[in-house]
Amino acid sequence: MANGREGRPPTLTERARRAQLIEVAIEQVAEHGYAGTSLSRIADGAGITKAAVLYHFSSKDAVILAAYEHVLAALVETVGAAVDAAGDAGKPAAYARAMIGHLRARPRHTRMLIEAVTGTAAERAPEARWRPLAGLLDGAVRARGGAGIDSRTAALAIGGAIDAIVAERLRDPGYDTAAAAEVLAAMIDTWITR
């Protein structure tokens, strides 16, 4: 967490205001996109002045980056808990279900992730996404006594499928992503038991 003024730890009030600004930024980016979100919109949404926003964050990008990191941390926590609760053989399917379920339940977070990555320098190295899933796939293959797979390609394909399912839900709110997650989980199970 950033320090308060003069490098001291932030006060409870400062932490609460930063948390509020992060939530407002998520809401504004989800509604207006990165380009349509300004410091003024964030300030108005929080009921404070633009100067007050700048007290807590040095720029629009700093607020957006903090919001992106907040959303990403929530996603990682949810997916991590689901993966940790599954046995080795079920971890890849748990990963896919948890990713899709988390983003289905939080469409504003989904839009925030998309907009922050396309509008700011929040882009992460591609292997930061596929490598953990590839490790889960390798572990699942070992647990099931499978013959082995190209886990990098499988992880990229699963990540692409997750992205497509989530994007389709944003386009069509009636799309049944829970059913889609089960189809993807069944596909994953087929891959790792060959």
Image (tube, rainbow, N blue to C red):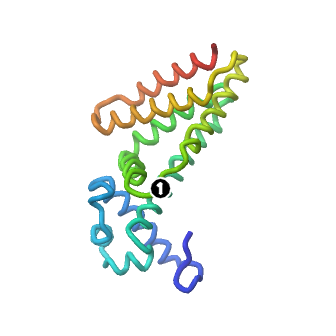
Nearer the observer, 120 or 173: 120
Quick check: 20 above or below 29?
A: below
> Could you say where residue 170 lies in the image, as x and y percent from the top left?
32, 39
- Position in image of residue 161 (x %, y %): 45, 29
Q: Amino acid at mark 1?
A: Ala
The quadrant in which the C terminus is found is top right
* Vertical arrangement, residue 116 with respect to residue 6, above or below: above
* Residue that appears at 30% across and 73% down: 47
Q: Tell me what residue is drawn at x 29 percent, y 36 percent.
A: 173
Judging by the rendered image, the residue that carries numbered circle 1 is: 122
> In this image, 109 relative to 31: left or right?
right
Is 60 placed left or right of 70 in the picture? left
Q: Nearer the viewer, residue 9 or 131?
A: 131
Which quadrant of the structure image shows residue 154? top right
* Closer to us: 98 or 130: 130
Furthest residue to the bottom?
6
Q: Nearer the viewer, residue 107 or 164?
A: 164
For image coordinates 37% across by 55% down, the residue present is 119
Q: Is residue 32 left or right of residue 14?
A: left
